[in-house]
């Protein structure tokens, strides 16, 4: 019966969206721009990560009885693929280069390094007779790749210096399997971020929902609609349908943009379809939060500010921003976090779409979506239409 | 349906509406018949909008009852909404839609048959002198144009009861004439029309019957002619002065 009314209101909303440059920007252009800029800015970073590290080396062990240990260390380090060794003769100059970002890492071979190695070989099984020294490793804390890749590399160099090159290829009864993250080191930073960016791009829908509803309310339009045969469920349905249409377009645009800039997630068509469904479910959450934001906003002017209450936590604690310990705990209640998590599993870890965890994430986001949406609808109908 | 044989288009009995300490409408009783153009007359703050809002199902009375075509405005609100066409005092419209689209939307909400709707919009736009501007965004309209669009939005469904809250306020004389003619014509189709105004000459010119309210109370009721005779006044303005001891406009 009310189909025509709902349809007519959806059409009205579509016209409203497309005729307002600011809304078009936030709903369609903004997601594209975010995807494109982040993709282009971070897409190159760390790609083939091991090929170009500049490592500073300061050898303080020149006066040792047997300088060959330190020379061997230097040799082993130089031999590593993708490492350029730059020599320093003072700690300060090396540290300063590191601080300025001209070095990815700075290594100091301490005085007594050779003696230390010799003492090991004199009695390899009696630790109490060894003279201990420490190879200092400083990494560029501004580079995610360097700080994760350098420590194991230096470890490897120290091992092969002491035990010879065969040490790393020795057959051992225990095999240390390469952890998955080793593989990840060939990803660009963009690929770590992409799942979060996709979630991020649709969060701003909250603001548009809150904005347009409060504008309609402040202009007396909701009241005026209330004098017609329009039922409130028809009105609410028209809102949800309108924003779901926007969400579909948004997701398609974001996927297309990332494809154009060369992003190829480690998944297949089914994974993309899944991601699509996930982002639609997430849009339910955002429409719901938008309704809640509209309900508690006294006027259209403050609706933008109020919607940030719902945008910010989801953005910082559930998209592409790195999370610390405490934040990670709070992030567990952020719907966006589960979106990002599932997309990461598919796009980055390359898990198949049959993986249980991504379906758990989808179920969770859908349930949260329906609950938040219902809450939003009820609250708005009860308190938001004044 | 009972509404087709209902005796009164609108029936208001002992209607009272209080906002906290303010009594906006005070024990008002009133009956309005089919085909009648009724003017609710009074200075600003008299309670006219409150009466319209109650009849439009937007406000619940504090006391008393009101019904439209025998449908109670609270218990049969859905039925009432199908019968009425409301032009609010603040002309609400969608700025980003054109005048025509705004009108079309309200036709859709009332489920006016599509082909009929299209023709009717064209006719109404022409009558009200907006055919040239109908496809411009309403956000660019002047105040008078918006009021005219708003009036058409209210009447596009050919409602059996029209509730028009100050439809001609701040309108230029030419537009006002156009709206008056438009309203008069609708009345001839048997529509009941309630129009609020604080322009006495407007009430005098077009209303069949007027009710004068002041501070929420109905203080006079009758045809403009009867009221003038009754109070030995040359116009309704004078009637108001005789009744209240104050001038209508100055009371604004
Ligand atoms: N929502 C409201 N809350 C409080 N007071 C109101 C409200 N609406 C109207 N009033 C008061 O009720 C009285 C009548 O208002 P109104 O019906 O708008 O008068 P009119 O339309 O005749 O100018 C005024 O004193 C007004 O301030
Ligand atoms: Mg008023």
Image (tube, grey):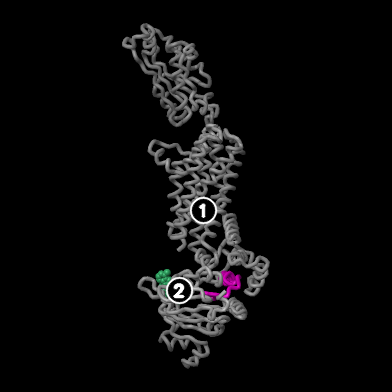
Looking at the rendered structure, the number of numbered marks drawn on it comes to 2
Between circles 1 and 2, the one closer to the viewer is: 2
Frontmost residue, B106 versus B225: B106
**Which quadrant, please, contains the C terminus of chain A?**
bottom left
- Relative horizontal placement of residue A53, taking residue A11 as reference (left or right): left
Could you tell me how far apart the alpha carbons at marks 1 and 2 are, in whole angstroms? 33 Å
Q: Residue at x 58, y 75 (%)?
A: B160
Is ligand 1 within 8 Å of the beta carbon of the residue shown at mark 2? Answer: yes
Residue under label 1, please give it.
A208
Callout 2: SS = helix
Residues indicated by labels 1 and 2 sit on the same polypeptide chain = no
Percent position of residue B128, x then y: 62, 74
**Which quadrant, please, contains the N terminus of chain A?**
bottom right
Magenta region includes residue B151: yes
Q: Residue at x 50, y 88 (%)?
A: B235
Percent position of residue B251, x then y: 43, 80
Percent position of residue B129, x then y: 63, 73
Magenta region includes residue A25: no
Which subunit holds the residue at mark 2? Answer: B
Percent position of residue B190, x then y: 60, 79
Tell me where the magenta segment starts and ends, as one range: B144-168
Is ligand 1 within 8 Å of the beta carbon of the residue shown at mark 1? Answer: no
The crowding category of the residue bearing disc 2, from other C-alpha atoms within 10 Å (few below 14, some 14 to 19, many at least 20), is many
Which subunit holds the residue at mark 1? Answer: A
Circle 1/circle 2 CB separation < 8 Å: no
Residue under label 2, please give it.
B50
Frontmost residue, A15 versus B16: B16
Whether residue B170 appears in this view of the structure is: no
């Amino acid at each position: 019966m009310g189909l025509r009314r709902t349809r007519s209101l959806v059409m009205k909303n579509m016209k409203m969206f497309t005729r307002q440059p600011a809304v078009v920007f936030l709903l369609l252009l903004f997601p594209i721009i975010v995807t494109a800029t982040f993709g282009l800015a971070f897409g190159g970073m760390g790609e083939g990560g091991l090929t170009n590290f500049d490592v500073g080396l300061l050898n303080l062990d020149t006066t040792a009885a047997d300088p060959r240990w330190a020379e061997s260390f230097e040799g082993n380090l130089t031999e590593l693929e993708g490492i350029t060794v730059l020599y320093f003769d003072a700690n300060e100059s090396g540290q300063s280069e590191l601080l300025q970002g001209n070095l990815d890492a700075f290594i100091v071979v301490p005085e007594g390094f050779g003696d230390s190695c010799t003492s090991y070989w004199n009695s390899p099984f009696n630790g109490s007779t060894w003279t201990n020294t420490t190879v200092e490793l400083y990494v560029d804390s501004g580079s995610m790749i360097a700080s994760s890749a350098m420590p194991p590399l230096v470890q490897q160099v120290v091992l092969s210096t002491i035990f010879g090159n065969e040490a790393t290829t020795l057959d051992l009864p225990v095999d240390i399997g390469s952890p998955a993250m080793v593989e990840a080191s060939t990803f660009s930073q963009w690929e770590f971020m992409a799942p979060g960016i996709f979630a991020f791009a649709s969060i701003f829908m909250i603001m548009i929902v809150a904005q347009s509803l409060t504008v309609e309310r402040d202009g007396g339009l909701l009241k005026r609609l209330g004098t017609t045969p329009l039922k409130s469920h028809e009105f609410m349905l028209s809102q949800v349908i309108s924003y779901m249409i926007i969400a579909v377009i948004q997701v398609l645009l974001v996927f297309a943009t990332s494809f154009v800039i060369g992003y190829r997630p480690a998944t297949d068509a089914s994974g993309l379809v899944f991601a699509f469904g996930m982002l639609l479910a997430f849009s339910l959450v955002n429409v719901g939060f938008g309704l809640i934001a509209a309900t508690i906003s006294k006027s259209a002017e403050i609706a933008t500010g109020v919607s940030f209450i719902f945008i910010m936590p989801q953005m910082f604690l559930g998209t592409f921003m790195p999370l610390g310990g405490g934040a990670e705990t709070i992030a567990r209640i952020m719907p966006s976090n589960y979106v990002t998590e599932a997309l990461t599993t598919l796009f980055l870890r390359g898990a198949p779409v049959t993986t249980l965890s991504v379906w758990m994430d989808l179920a969770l986001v859908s349930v949260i979506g329906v609950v938040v949406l219902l809450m939003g609808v009820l609250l708005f109908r009860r308190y938001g239409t004044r | 349906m009972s509404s087709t044989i209902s005796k009164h288009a609108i029936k208001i009995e002992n209607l009272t509406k209080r906002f906290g300490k303010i009594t906006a409408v005070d024990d008002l009783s009133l009956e309005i018949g089919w085909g009648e153009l009724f003017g609710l007359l009074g200075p600003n703050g008299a309670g006219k909008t409150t009466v319209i809002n109650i009849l439009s199902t937007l406000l619940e009375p504090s006391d008393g009852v009101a019904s439209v075509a025998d449908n109670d405005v609270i218990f049969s609100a859905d039925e009432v909404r199908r019968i009425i066409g409301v032009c609010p005092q603040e002309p609400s419209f969608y700025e980003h839609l054109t005048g025509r689209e705004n009108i079309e939307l309200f036709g859709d909400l009332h489920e006016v048959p599509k082909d009929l709707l299209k023709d009717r919009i064209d006719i109404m736009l022409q009558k009200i002198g907006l055919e040239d501007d109908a496809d411009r965004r309403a956000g660019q309209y002047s105040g008078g144009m918006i009021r005219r669009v708003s009036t058409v939005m209210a009447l596009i469904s050919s409602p059996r009861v029209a509730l028009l809250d100050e439809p001609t306020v701040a309108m230029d004389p030419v537009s006002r004439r156009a709206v008056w003619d438009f309203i008069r014509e609708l009345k001839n189709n048997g529509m009941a029309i309630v129009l609020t105004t604080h322009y006495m000459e407007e009430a005098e010119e077009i209303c069949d019957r007027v009710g004068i309210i002041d501070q929420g109370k109905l203080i006079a009721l009758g045809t403009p002619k009867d009221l003038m005779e009754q109070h030995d006044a040359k116009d309704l303005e004078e009637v108001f002065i005789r009744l209240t001891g104050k001038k209508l406009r100055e009371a604004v």
